[in-house]
Image: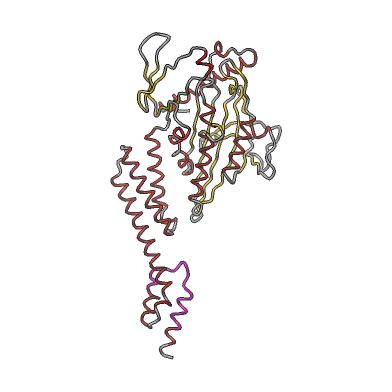
């Protein structure tokens, strides 16, 4: 009895061990088991739990050490240094999460990773400009048009000054594609999806003259998707990776700015059966009398009211929303393009991320805008209402140019 009673008590301790047991508690049980000479197989699971806690402690200690080293040694003015620091932080965080470290122990490191990641984006430029040159179309070749652009390197474009018969003029960009693949173009913007998940607002414009290939670059074609469909796939891929740590809510909306009037493209047609519709003013559908309007909230953010917003549970649902909105866009034929976009198309993805462990919430947004084509009235040969459309398009593009110039120079809104 003297031998069996202590063993019985230790067995009861082993049976009542919880998942939240501390390393000290587990060590104490193992010590008692060895003292009463329990068979090792009886406390093997406790030893495994202790080994796992030690692994987690080692991983979290490594995370803290890495954060301290990054803060001490990372050169914030050096792009390569920032990329290396992000790589180290991402790697040690992933290792800790794979082992099962508590999210609250990793919050500081994750904040540092986000800070480094977005320092990289800022170093690339808070406003970045890529140039894509498409090949001449058959019609252009038949008219005798010649290619007057050529890439000097991956960031420089040379354009022949044909009208003035002068030397070629060079222009510098953040990247040049001649024309590059859809995948190559998206790769330059791919990291911005992570920025949106981290709570930042991201905007992508496609700008150029009528027929330059803006809509193709932004939306692409079946089996050759553009930036928007690839963004959707990347967004849900990243969400799947972190599904055990976060819950996500994704809300999509789609509008066009047509002759200075904001039009809700999702309100033009019925939502698919069972698809939830949201609104900034109601919990169901937007009232028929309400028109989309824009205002600045107390925090300085730009908000659009009275638009249909749909919650999308999957990439397929968000892609369907995009397709439905695209079908409603205003297009017309001009002398420069048989299907010229006559409006600015605005596709908005709002993302709410909530930590399953801490409840911490972040809100980000991706706004993709396929701008209407700029064109000279003389070359587009439009008349009547379409001429008025062209005038409004050019006025709005000029205004946008002024805004971007103001942002680059740090002017206030």
- The vertical placement of 254 against 170, above or below, is below
By what rule are the colours in the image chosen? secondary structure
Residue at point 45%, 38% (across, down):
190
Q: Position of residue 143 (x, y in %)?
A: 52, 12
Q: Main secondary structure of the magenta part?
A: helix
Residue 292 image point, x, y percent? 63, 31
Residue extending farthest to the right is 288
Counting from the top left corner in percent of width and height, residue 120 is at: 38, 38
Q: Quadrant of residue 265?
A: top right
Q: Which residues are magenta?
A: 8-27
How many marks the image carries: the answer is 0
Name the residue located 36 percent from the left edge and 54 percent from the top edge. 63
Residue occupying image coordinates x 50% and y 25%: 207
Name above or below for residue 379 compared with residue 61. above
Task: State the residue lying farthest toward the bottom.
Answer: 1
Vertical side of 389 occupied by 15: above or below: below
Which quadrant is home to the N terminus? bottom left
Q: Decide if residue 270 is on the left or right side of residue 373.
A: right
Q: Quadrant of residue 40?
A: bottom left
Residue extending farthest top: 164
Vertical comparison of 381 with 232: above or below: above
Residue 258: which quarter of the image? top right
- Magenta stretch contains residue 18: yes
């Amino acid at each position: 009895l003297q031998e069996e009673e202590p063993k019985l008590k230790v067995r009861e301790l082993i049976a009542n061990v919880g998942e939240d047991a501390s390393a000290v508690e587990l060590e104490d049980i193992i010590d008692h088991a060895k003292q009463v000479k329990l068979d090792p197989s009886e406390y093997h699971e406790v030893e495994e739990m202790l080994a796992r806690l030690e692994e987690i402690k080692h991983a979290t200690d490594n995370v803290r050490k890495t954060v301290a080293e990054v803060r001490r040694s990372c050169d914030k003015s050096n792009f390569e240094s920032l990329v290396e620091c992000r790589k180290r932080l991402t790697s040690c965080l992933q290792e800790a999460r794979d082992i099962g470290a508590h999210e609250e122990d990793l919050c500081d490191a994750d904040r540092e990773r986000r800070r480094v990641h977005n320092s990289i984006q800022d170093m690339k430029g808070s406003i970045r400009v890529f140039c894509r040159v498409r090949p001449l179309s058959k019609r252009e070749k038949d008219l005798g048009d010649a290619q007057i652009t050529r890439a000097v390197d991956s960031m420089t474009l040379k354009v022949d000054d044909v009208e003035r018969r002068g030397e070629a003029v060079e222009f510098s960009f953040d990247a040049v594609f001649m024309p590059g693949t859809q995948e190559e173009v998206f790769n330059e913007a791919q990291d911005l999806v992570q920025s949106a998940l981290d709570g930042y607002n991201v905007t992508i414009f496609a700008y150029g003259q009528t027929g330059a290939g803006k809509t193709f670059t932004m939306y692409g074609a079946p089996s050759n998707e553009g930036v928007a469909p690839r963004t959707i796939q990347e967004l849900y891929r990243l969400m799947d990776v972190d599904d055990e740590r976060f819950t996500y809510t994704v809300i999509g909306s789609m509008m066009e700015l047509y002759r200075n009037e904001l039009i809700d493209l999702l309100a033009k047609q019925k939502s698919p059966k069972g698809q939830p519709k949201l609104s900034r003013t109601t919990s169901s559908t937007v009232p028929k009398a309400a028109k989309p309007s824009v205002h600045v909230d107390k925090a300085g953010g730009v908000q659009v009211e009275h638009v249909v917003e749909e919650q999308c549970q999957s990439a397929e649902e968000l892609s369907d929303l995009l397709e439905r909105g695209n079908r409603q866009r205003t297009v017309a034929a001009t002398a420069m393009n048989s299907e010229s976009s006559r409006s600015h198309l605005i596709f908005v993805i709002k993302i709410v991320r909530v930590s399953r462990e801490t409840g911490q919430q972040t809100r980000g947004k991706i706004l993709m805008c396929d701008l209407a084509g700029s064109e000279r009235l003389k070359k587009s040969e439009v008349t009547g209402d379409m001429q008025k459309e062209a005038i409004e398009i050019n006025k709005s593009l000029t205004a946008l140019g002024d805004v971007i110039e103001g942002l680059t120079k740090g002017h206030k809104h």
